[in-house]
């Protein structure tokens, strides 16, 4: 069975429209409370009262879903602990450190404020498996779920955890080596008016850095609005104007990071992966000399790391699949070119601030500016298109498109790649082509996109 509500990163959609409605959130809270009560997310201990942490970003609609999820959880006899605005990885951390039974994140990440989403962490801080999400969906669609609710004194309670931000700040500071500081560094941080608006500036300033803030004034509707990781031009401008040593831009839920060096250059996401992998190997902290990334990373990453004896394992798109592969193969580092960097020695999921702290630690150890450190990586020319589609017909049912893709793959051979996939969260198709010739790569990507759109329109008519 396929999941109908959950995509590659939880449930997501336009707020107050199916599936992101209050009643769906209520049912999700009930379903999650039910599986927690029966111990499906971890073995229950005698006398243990089940608790679920709920956090959110800064969207106006978060108030709706926070209350609805909490109501569903409490109606199943489980307590809801609300931490307010906090980065996605911070919620995973708090849920794990407080020995809660699960963590719920209300956020649509990098999407505009009109959207929202819900994703869930198990008690160990890792995202749920596809199978568990399917089980939750089955329960949500079962009219008998309401029959499983307790009553009287068995109902759950809802309360707020006021020191969650402080707990997470202390943890993030520990990523920097003991007794190390950021004294003398000038750092620009763009928090996208999102979940990291309190945490990120606090961490840097408490460690001694001079902090220039961008996107730290959320009002409920300005999350990701011209600021954050999707709009690096603002970060570049701020770094140049302040003559900063480095600039960091987070997305709405702060699990993704974009980095700008001291020269005002935005670093390629694969360059960050390469730098971190090489740094870890040099300190003998890269198990099996192997890292994990997705099919979206440039083949330049493979070639760069192969020179230093580092292997690259690839997964489907989604940081959860990167984490699954890392855990399965007992690896500690991986990520996505989009800015998700995952250090399992520190965090259970992609964490923009853990990544930023790791990069700062590298800079302080090497005593070199970031503009010098990032020269280890050279990307192959790549064209990536994100094209709206009227429907998602499986590519296997579009023979003309498949033939075109095969022909272009054969033309580029071992010096290029072609990847075509539908987005897991939006009505879009992603077309990526890599090769040695920039103009040829761009032309091939556009050709595939046009052929695919024509084929889809033909199916509709």
Image: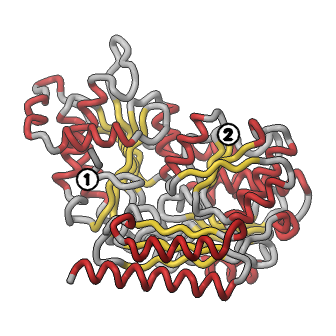
- Residue named by callout 1: 4
- Residue named by callout 2: 332
Could you say where residue 266 lies in the image, as x and y percent from the top left?
Answer: 70, 74
Q: Is residue 337 above or below residue 286?
A: below
Residue 208 figure quarter: bottom right
Q: Is residue 352 above or below residue 298?
A: above
Q: Is residue 282 above or below residue 225?
A: above
Question: Does 166 sit left or right of 397 as displayed?
Answer: right
For the N terminus, give its image quadrant: top left
Which of the pair 14/99 is nearer the observer? 14
Could you say where residue 278 lies in the image, as x and y percent from the top left?
Answer: 82, 51
Tell me the residue at 68%/45% (across/down).
333
Whether residue 216 is visible here, answered yes or no, is: no
Question: Which of the two discs, 2 and 1, labels the residue nearer the N terminus?
Answer: 1
Q: Is residue 69 above or below residue 405?
A: above
Which of the pair 419/16 is nearer the observer? 419
Q: How is the image coloured?
A: secondary structure
Could you say where residue 398 lies in the image, as x and y percent from the top left?
Answer: 36, 71
Residue 352 figure quarter: bottom right
Residue 437 figure quarter: bottom right
Tell me the residue at 78%/57% (across/down).
275
Question: Does 427 sit left or right of 299 as displayed?
Answer: left
Q: Residues within 10 Å of mark 2 (few under 14, many from 20)?
A: many
For the C terminus, give its image quadrant: bottom left
Residue 387 numbered tag? none
Tell me the residue at 56%/78% (across/down).
231
Tell me the residue at 46%/27% (across/down).
99
């Amino acid at each position: 069975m396929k999941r109908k509500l959950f995509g590659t990163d939880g449930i997501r959609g336009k707020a107050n429209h199916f599936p992101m409605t209050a009643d769906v959130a209520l049912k999700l809270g009930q379903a999650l409370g039910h599986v927690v009560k029966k111990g499906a997310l971890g073995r229950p201990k005698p006398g243990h009262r089940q608790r679920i942490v709920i956090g959110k970003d800064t969207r106006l609609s978060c108030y709706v879903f926070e209350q609805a999820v909490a109501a569903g959880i409490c109606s199943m006899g489980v307590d809801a602990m609300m931490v307010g605005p906090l980065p996605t990885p911070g919620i995973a951390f708090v849920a794990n450190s407080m020995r809660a039974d699960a963590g719920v994140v209300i956020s649509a990440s990098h999407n505009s404020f009109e959207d929202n989403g819900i994703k869930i962490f198990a008690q160990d801080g890792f995202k749920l498996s596809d199978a568990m999400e399917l089980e939750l969906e089955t329960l949500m669609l079962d009219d008998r779920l309401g029959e499983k609710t307790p009553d009287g004194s068995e109902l759950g309670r809802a309360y707020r955890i006021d020191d969650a931000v402080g707990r997470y700040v202390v943890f993030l500071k520990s990523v920097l080596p003991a007794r190390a500081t950021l004294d003398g560094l000038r750092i620009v941080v763009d928090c996208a008016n999102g979940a990291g608006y309190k945490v990120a500036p606090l961490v840097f300033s408490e460690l001694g850095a001079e902090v220039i803030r961008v996107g730290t004034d959320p009002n409920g509707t300005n999350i990701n609005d011209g600021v954050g990781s999707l709009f690096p031009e603002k970060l570049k401008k701020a770094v140049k104007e302040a003559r900063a040593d480095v600039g960091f831009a987070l997305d709405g839920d702060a699990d993704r990071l974009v980095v700008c060096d001291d020269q005002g250059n935005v670093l390629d996401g694969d360059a960050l992966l390469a730098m971190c992998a090489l740094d870890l190997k040099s300190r003998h902290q890269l198990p099996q000399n192997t890292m994990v990334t997705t099919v979206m990373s440039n083949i330049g990453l493979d070639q760069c790391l192969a020179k230093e004896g580092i292997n690259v394992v690839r997964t489907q798109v989604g940081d959860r699949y990167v984490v699954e592969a890392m855990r399965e193969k007992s690896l500690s580092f991986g990520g996505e070119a989009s800015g998700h960097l995952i250090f399992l020695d520190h965090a259970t999921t992609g964490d923009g601030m853990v990544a930023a702290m790791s990069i700062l630690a590298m800079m302080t150890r090497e005593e070199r500016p970031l503009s010098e450190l990032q020269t280890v990586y050279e990307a192959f020319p790549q064209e990536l298109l994100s094209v709206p589609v009227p429907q998602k017909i499986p590519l296997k049912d579009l023979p003309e498109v498949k033939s075109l893709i095969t022909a272009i793959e054969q033309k580029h051979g071992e010096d290029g790649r072609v990847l075509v996939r539908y987005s897991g969260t939006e009505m879009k198709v992603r077309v990526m082509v890599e090769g040695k010739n920039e103009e040829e790569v761009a032309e091939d990507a556009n050709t595939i996109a046009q052929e695919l759109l024509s084929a889809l329109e033909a199916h509709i008519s």
